[in-house]
Amino acid sequence: MRTLIKNGRIVTAGDFFQGSISIEDGVIQEIGCDISGSFDYEIDAAGKLVMPGGVDVHTHFNLHTGSAVARDDFFAGTVAAACGGTTCVVDHMGFGPAGCSLFHQLRVYYEYAKEHAVIDYSFHGVIQHVNSDILAQLEDMLVQEGIASFKQYMTYDYRLPEADILRLMEKVKTIGGILTIHAENHEIIEYLKDRFIREGDTAPIYHALSRPDYCEADAVNRVISLAAAVGNVPLYIVHLTSALGLKHVISARASGQTVYSETCPQYLLLNEECYNQELDEGLKYILSPPLRKKRDSEALWEGIRLGHIQVIATDHCPFTIALDKQKGRGDFSKCPNGLPGVEERIPLMFSEGVMKGRFSINKMVELCAANPAKIFGMYPKKGALLPGSDGDIVILDPDKEVTLTQSMLHSNADYTAYEGFKLRGYPVMTLSRGEVIVQNNEFIGQKGRGKFVKRQGFSEQQTII
Amino acid sequence: MRTLIKNGRIVTAGDFFQGSISIEDGVIQEIGCDISGSFDYEIDAAGKLVMPGGVDVHTHFNLHTGSAVARDDFFAGTVAAACGGTTCVVDHMGFGPAGCSLFHQLRVYYEYAKEHAVIDYSFHGVIQHVNSDILAQLEDMLVQEGIASFKQYMTYDYRLPEADILRLMEKVKTIGGILTIHAENHEIIEYLKDRFIREGDTAPIYHALSRPDYCEADAVNRVISLAAAVGNVPLYIVHLTSALGLKHVISARASGQTVYSETCPQYLLLNEECYNQELDEGLKYILSPPLRKKRDSEALWEGIRLGHIQVIATDHCPFTIALDKQKGRGDFSKCPNGLPGVEERIPLMFSEGVMKGRFSINKMVELCAANPAKIFGMYPKKGALLPGSDGDIVILDPDKEVTLTQSMLHSNADYTAYEGFKLRGYPVMTLSRGEVIVQNNEFIGQKGRGKFVKRQGFSEQQTII
Amino acid sequence: MRTLIKNGRIVTAGDFFQGSISIEDGVIQEIGCDISGSFDYEIDAAGKLVMPGGVDVHTHFNLHTGSAVARDDFFAGTVAAACGGTTCVVDHMGFGPAGCSLFHQLRVYYEYAKEHAVIDYSFHGVIQHVNSDILAQLEDMLVQEGIASFKQYMTYDYRLPEADILRLMEKVKTIGGILTIHAENHEIIEYLKDRFIREGDTAPIYHALSRPDYCEADAVNRVISLAAAVGNVPLYIVHLTSALGLKHVISARASGQTVYSETCPQYLLLNEECYNQELDEGLKYILSPPLRKKRDSEALWEGIRLGHIQVIATDHCPFTIALDKQKGRGDFSKCPNGLPGVEERIPLMFSEGVMKGRFSINKMVELCAANPAKIFGMYPKKGALLPGSDGDIVILDPDKEVTLTQSMLHSNADYTAYEGFKLRGYPVMTLSRGEVIVQNNEFIGQKGRGKFVKRQGFSEQQTII
Amino acid sequence: MRTLIKNGRIVTAGDFFQGSISIEDGVIQEIGCDISGSFDYEIDAAGKLVMPGGVDVHTHFNLHTGSAVARDDFFAGTVAAACGGTTCVVDHMGFGPAGCSLFHQLRVYYEYAKEHAVIDYSFHGVIQHVNSDILAQLEDMLVQEGIASFKQYMTYDYRLPEADILRLMEKVKTIGGILTIHAENHEIIEYLKDRFIREGDTAPIYHALSRPDYCEADAVNRVISLAAAVGNVPLYIVHLTSALGLKHVISARASGQTVYSETCPQYLLLNEECYNQELDEGLKYILSPPLRKKRDSEALWEGIRLGHIQVIATDHCPFTIALDKQKGRGDFSKCPNGLPGVEERIPLMFSEGVMKGRFSINKMVELCAANPAKIFGMYPKKGALLPGSDGDIVILDPDKEVTLTQSMLHSNADYTAYEGFKLRGYPVMTLSRGEVIVQNNEFIGQKGRGKFVKRQGFSEQQTII
């Protein structure tokens, strides 16, 4: 099976040029001016942009929270991803039963994904307690299963005490992995949440007020301090939202620590004004960390431009406003936390980022594909258009104008946080390992065709970002 | 009893002028050009500087640490203070037995001071656990005893969990007090200390390396974040040492939080090179937080100049090198922590601060007398030369040249950390409530003449700094 | 002639206390609890604040600009000052005829002030060209006449080329004076002004747009760089308005340069929105530098708090909107530049600064009286309440509520920029050298009673700020 | 003529992968895993890095300064460049006769290069005066000759007054070009130089002291302010050297201005200690701006990492120490300014940058090839390895160990500033348009084979950096 994409303007993290790409058996063979030979399938990308398929390293498919289950399983979720130009996800495993082995959740998630996912996928390990068994399993996970990243929460029931974080960091460093962190100060949240609820302040805006910027920033700073003590453990701060938190990241990087950070479209494009709308509207935006002030968004855009933030992911975690989110009526703290977004990411970042001059199109590829693939050990198989890379490609029409609306999207959520956004540029075709799986916003592939990606350890990276 | 000080150059936090001061029954009556009337005692201060006596709000007399007892009791310690130009101390009460009432230690300290202290004194409350009884006692301490400040440790056995700190802060805010904080991240210290000892790194320098700047900075930032959650509780960071910690203080103050900070002469004038001397020499400087790098000292001097640091105190906690400090041979973590310094403060700050042009003489009065008195509810009784103020005065000869050496000092420690420092300017007379108690470096007052000072709450302050 | 002020709460740059002040022959004799003796005049200040009279070091009485003459001469201007609680001004001499000696303008200004001024005064020298004669005269001005400060413009016709600024700085440094600077980049202003006028953009807002923040900041940075080359010449930046300019000041001070800066109430309390009102309203606010954005004001307030800005003056330069300002109809560049303000300063800073918690009352005395007196060589004669100081005192009723309006003010301008401001606290009595000259907002002194103040050189300062 | 490079590890600004490159008639045809077909020339790059040839946008071949002529003409200079892995230069035209047309120097430089250069080249226009003719010629230069960048000096005889800079900027903006700036404050240099010479301070270190960091920073800030007034004219600061100057660049970029900056290996790897060696040694390092302090170098490395500095060039301007530099004996100001460096750049940046972990190898390609090509309108013809790009390639052996020494280099200078540097990694082959011109450090191409590159305007850039 040989495919040719020709006449397109090819975009990678570093380059932008007119050319052709040939793919054979799912793998890119050549990049050329004019590639000769015979092909089973030829795609004329004239006037279009040909980019590495998106890599979204922060999704929550199938997630069971205490109060609700995320509405997208690995089928619905990956179809939505593919339709939005994303060809690979790294999903965050949810917590397992108390005391369970690291492999417990991995087995659960293998089941979730197998026969469902339509694009390639991996998982981040989740650390919910620390002991010598768990620490031994970390290495097994990496060596045997190619799970190269592990997530640690600083809030929620399974947050780790600092002494355990230190032990965990030592191990992650030794095995050459990377630690991802949900950074919010648990005690501040509990204190404020209790106070607000006690005082009858239950509206959605109090969700935001109970998780202020300094609550995030304090946790970011702390995890950075702990990593410094252990000696430069690679850190990856998920969903960074605040100017204050970013300041700590910048300072740590300047002093030589390996700290990456991720933000999400919602933190760049929406802000806490959303919570002050009528109740049903406000509930839609309950997610953690919450939306911030406009000046935080501006700081994030600048952080991206200056290279302090390396990844844009989504934290896709879809609920319905009709049912799930209603639990937050009368008490914001009961509302399931999360937003859909896996499908909107690439279109939003192209339209709001590139077309509005906030960053270059190369930067967009870096943020949405190359960097996440590199940091999480999948490059150049994923996130690149190189000979030897998987034929994971999105073709985007830069002139297509679209007004975002729920009905055109593929998530099982019943709303999009970006309803009515007028976009310029939209994906028109998605290829996964050389196969066209989305055409004109319609998924035309096979359910379950996605494959698990065994990843390399962070220390195997050939290049630093 | 009427005393007149005439012909001197009077220095206060705001002014510098030629004038006379009359004192009656221990209290200043008038400030004038030429004060007429008859006096029991006339002091001709021609060519001398007449300044408010020093207020040292960070001493540890009588302190029982686990492994040793600070060598100065309230007699020796206050004599040393007086000889160095300090006329008032606020001592940090040590920890009491587990679970004890707040008043337990107060009673112990009343005993320590009574019949011993030669200058006026107060104590900072110490919070070693939090429950509703303790919280109720906080208010009693302030209202009944005039104990307006409470200290909380973020390391050591009696450190408080964050949830307790939040409760404590709420109470301190309600009663109008101020919280003082020893800010170091406990887990980082334990982790590094264990690692170093395990690896045989036991020399004094490892004391410093086990308490790095980010260990302090993390705790500073955290306590600031907690205070922000409660809503601007007044904080006072004791013995700030690092550029990194200072950065957090600056940022909090810029955003409107009430955060004061104190540094000490040792952090301004000495640095971690001290630990790399021969063992006996290195042990002398084991104190917590440890001495830092030269660039930290520079940041502190600048922090003082720009008003980010408001107080210079001493953390006076004297041990002998002959005996006490020897416990650190072979294991830095066994060495009692602390330095003497209550006597050296005023001479050092005059000579190294004022005479070297690092700050003005008014700033020196502010840092060493007026500000600590204001922050801790003793102004204008202490820290000022105003009609109505106590006649606590130090007369300093700006031209007197002194080479600091242990034998001239009055602490029971057997060394000074500033041996050999060449000073220009030295106190030549100290008055406490109008009585000359030190003349030419000799204490001539009565043992036990010092009185407890009942302080006002922070919220009673008439003016903000 | 002996006067006693008793029962007041006395405020100085450093202190705040209950006490009495005795004045004899215009000079303060004593500060005491209870001063005995007989007095010609006793003032009961119970419930009032007793503060050093304001020192305004930036006024333009009698100023002849090209197109108009400032409406207040030294009589009207100093009466307004006195009614607003200011007891000393340092007026900026205007430019003289091309090539004139430094003394030319001094003689003109002696004439302006003599027999007119009702409070004490001095002048800043103005440097409109540089040659060896002028440089020699600088020293004569300081030694013979006590003119200790010299102003240099970086815009307008008499701006100096950089090479001349360097020569001037060398001389000012040698004689121990201080250089004051109007810092705006001339070429940028000319370029933008021409462009706007050419394009028909003539409304008042274009006045602001033609003098953007970076135009000020560039000039501030340049003069600081030049001073660094000469070797730390003392600089005083007049009317600093922008966050960007302040950044350069902060950076220079941090690196050890002696740079003071002044801002004015208009830059703290008003912003560029004023220019977008109807034409007549907009013209009122045409002054240079122009009003800035709200975020600049916030940066200035913070700069004050952190000690980066040392002085609040007024740049008082009154015109009428009925006549003078009309010249700006149809062309902002034809409008005389300036605002009245000498009378509003103290009330505004008390009400908006102290009462709104932006700074302490001590800080207010520092900014409005002590610091300007110190920097410009008049302390402790002016700016202080000390034995030996002139009896220049303002008594302020902190509870008096006033709505500012033109009719209550004493300038010949026909408007106030602060019309309708609701103030809490207002001066109720002003004394100049012990004589009550304003009572209940009415001037009751003698025309021409003000005296010229011979100032000391900056290098004679006994203390650094 | 078809060439194949196979088995190499290919490095571009964004990617790093194993692959092959085919070149036909000087132009890259394909990038592939395994490229089939027949080739005239096959290069086995196993174990080697295959990178875009270096683009050095700051050289001074043939330069006539007042006192000396740079020792490398376009033959010697480009041979040195090629041997060091650089395949394209943009040379800075020197000043022409007073009042000359813009085209005068272009014709002179066409002559210099033609029949001499061995790699491709272009020139930066030089603006030595401004009038309407010159402004008209700017557009002609760009449209007719592809000269897309123009240099303006802020010091030296041909510096432009600010009003002219503003006019020039307007024009550059209109035509879509970019302005390059030598940023040093002329008056400060003259003032300090005169003072030092007058006082007998003639040693090389005074060269550095006469051009302090604030002298550069002031000029950087000024040109940025002027560009802001005109409205975001693209600026390119050549040879940025100081932390202080960088601060202004960062601030401007953060506020949205298009400001690029370049630094050079000497500012990263050498510092002002060099001037304190014996006289002959010190003279070698006389260049402008001068070498700075170590902390400046550190700031530059960080500036590179964080993307504030986009280009590393050389400012290659070679003189001999035996003859030329001797003019500086007894008077630093008589010494010709400049260093050789065109050959050392790529090896130094690989060894000191990549191998020491200061930046990634992709970043190195970005800094030394892709970014300069993009900024100056030659991408993707130069600076990239893409189908359609010129076959300008350097093959580097990452394991080759070399101790840098003058005898191995090809410049006519008689010294290298990096004598004795131990390098790891060195270029082993250079191709220009598909032709191997350097092999094992020997030039094997034809004199005069280099071609002039017609560049595109800055506004034609397809992507922003």
Image (cartoon, coloured by chain):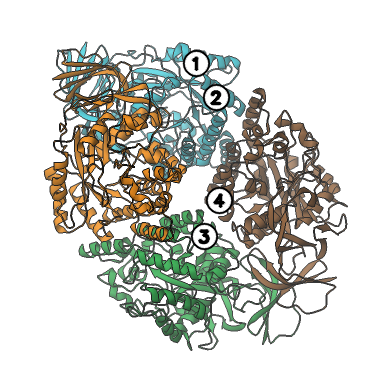
Chain colours: A cyan, B brown, C green, D orange
Disc 4 from disc 2: Cα separation: 33 Å
Q: Chain of mark 4?
A: B
Disc 1 from disc 3: Cα separation: 57 Å
Disc 2 from disc 1: Cα separation: 21 Å
Q: Look at the picture and state if D455 lies above or below C274.
A: above
Q: Look at the picture and state if C218 lies above or below C152.
A: above
Q: Chain of mark 3?
A: C
Label 2 crowd (10 A; few <14 / some 14-19 / many >=20): many
Residue assigned mark 3: C304
Could you tell me which secondary element the residue under label 1 belongs to? Answer: helix
Task: Examine the rendering and report whether any part of residue D142 can be seen.
Answer: yes
Q: Amino acid at mark 3?
A: Ile
Q: Nearer the viewer, mark 4 or mark 1?
A: 4
The answer to which of D292 and D196 lies nearer the viewer is D196
In the figure, residue C318 lies in which quadrant? Answer: bottom left
Q: Is residue D200 left or right of residue D231?
A: right
Residue assigned mark 2: A169
Question: What residue do we see at 88% from left, 55% from top?
Answer: B447
Could you tell me which secondary element the residue under label 3 belongs to? Answer: helix
Q: Nearer the viewer, mark 2 or mark 1?
A: 2
Q: Residue furthest left?
A: D144
Determine contact: label 1, label 3, CB under 8 Å: no
Could you tell me which secondary element the residue under label 2 belongs to? Answer: helix
Which quadrant does the C terminus of chain B fall into? Answer: bottom right
Q: Chain of mark 1?
A: A
Residue assigned mark 4: B253
Q: Amino acid at mark 2?
A: Met
Could you tell me which secondary element the residue under label 4 belongs to? Answer: helix
Disc 3 from disc 2: Cα separation: 44 Å
Q: Look at the picture and state if D129 lies above or below A164.
A: below
Residue assigned mark 1: A105
